[in-house]
Image: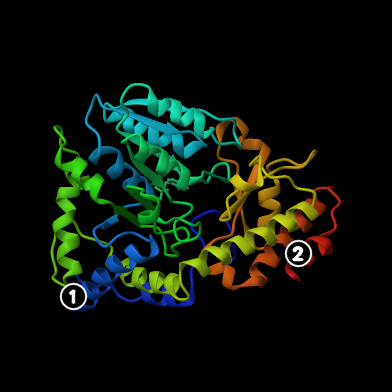
Amino acid sequence: MPLLMIPGPVEISPRVLEACSGAPSSHLAPDIIEAFGASLGLMRKAWLASDSAQPFVLPGSGTTAMEMAATNLLDPGDEAVVVWTGYFSDRMAEMLRRRGVKVTVVEAEPGDVPSLDAVGAALGSGSPRALFATHVDTSTGVRVDARALARLAADRGALSIFDGVCATGAERFEMQAWGADVYLTASQKAVGLPAGLGLLVVGERALEARKRLRVAPPLSLDFDSWIPIMRAYEERRPSYFATPPTTLLRGLRVALEEMLDGGMEARFAEHERAARRMRAAWAALGLSLLPKREEITANTLSALYLPEGVGPELAAEIGKRGVVVAGGLLPALRTRYFRVGHMGAVLKRPEALRATVGAVGEALGALGHRVDVAAALSAFET
Ligand code: PMP
């Protein structure tokens, strides 16, 4: 099997793979009730959320979780601010527009984040009820300052919603301490499962916002459809609204237990350390990052400019060496960069990170771009 080093889906741990690989169970079976119920409690811990926050596990993906957030908090005609950092900010803005929300997008150059002053100004004009930001945008490798944005939103009386699809469980996020209202993700990224689940934790203020809505969200995304189900499973009672992927629920508990083993501090530090090594290796290969500054560079992936004279065929050349990486995603730069994921269980396998750097270096060499692969690999010796 090739080594899967795209920014999601990612390599999963042997224990999670085993948990997901049995015959499917009924969603009412005792082992599923236990896995589902336990996972909800574990999500609060991994999200560093309060006891009163409501976790949701949904059949679907990150997009499903985004759409749940976009449709449960705001009515048509309400205003919202979207912090633009890439492809997924555009998706969020489009979802809100389709809900009839008046959206102000605070722009930035690709590879940068809007200034807090610009976001503050957008929150200060009109009466926006919510701020939406992508914690790490997978198209640019840029990370926002979620703590500062959550505080800014709270100070202005707006809800803060963070798309953590490429961040949750890897990048520091302290939902309760930072006062963030919604933090959402998908199963196939740093959480470390196959694709198939949308995962959200929703704080009290956001749950209240749903109660005040005039226009109900789509039934399958409505907090009200799912809250009784989540409560039932957490109390270890089976319940039904729509069928969950039961094999993934088995894996979810294992993945969250692995994430919490050693604590979230250790988990954040592990990703930071790996990212530092990867960045040192890229620098030794002469590759430069799309994010414009270190403090806005994600730890979960590297978005790297293709060097002069090397085209998007690089990804296929790397693939020939047994490592799968991703091409560009942001339309404006799509053919000028490529992306490498480094999150989740694969960090426990330093040889996989080395193999990735080796494959990138050799592929560059094969395309006529001379690099010192040994120097890049020395990043892993410290
Ligand atoms: N947001 C971000 C930041 C993402 O990286 C992705 C997926 N790459 C999504 C949202 C959408 O998630 P999904 O593909 O699971 O629907």
Q: Is residue 49 above or below residue 315?
A: below
Crowdedness near tag 1: few (<14), some (14–19) or many (≥20) residues, C-alpha within 10 Å? few
Quarter the C terminus occupies: bottom right
Query: Residue visible at 41% across and 33% down?
Result: 82
CA–CA distance in space, label 2 to label 1: 48 Å
- Which label sits on residue 324? none
**Which dot, 2 or 1, sits closer to the camera?**
2
Callout 2, which amino acid?
A: Ala
Give the camera-side residue of 3 and 1.
3
Give the camera-side residue of 337 and 311.
337
Quarter the N terminus occupies: bottom right
Give the camera-side residue of 175 and 364.
175
Residue 247's image quarter?
A: bottom left
Work out whether residue 241 can be spotted: no
Q: Where is residue 341? Give x, y as percent.
A: 58, 56
Q: Furthest residue to the top?
A: 126
Tell whether label 1 touches label 2 (CB within 8 Å): no
Q: Is residue 336 above or below residue 50?
A: above
Residue 310's image quarter?
A: top right
Count of residue discs: 2
Q: Is residue 291 left or right of residue 264?
A: right
Q: Which type of secondary structure does the marked residue at label 2 adopt?
A: helix
Callout 1, which amino acid?
A: Ala
Q: Where is residue 196? Give x, y as percent.
A: 35, 57
Q: Where is residue 63? Give x, y as percent.
A: 36, 45
Query: Residue visible at 32% across and 47% down?
Result: 181
Work out whether residue 341 can be spotted: yes
Q: Which type of secondary structure does the marked residue at label 1 adopt?
A: loop
Q: Where is residue 14? Give x, y as percent.
A: 48, 76
- Which label sits on residue 29? 1
Query: Residue visible at 15% across and 49% down?
Result: 224
Name the residue tied to disc 2. Answer: 379
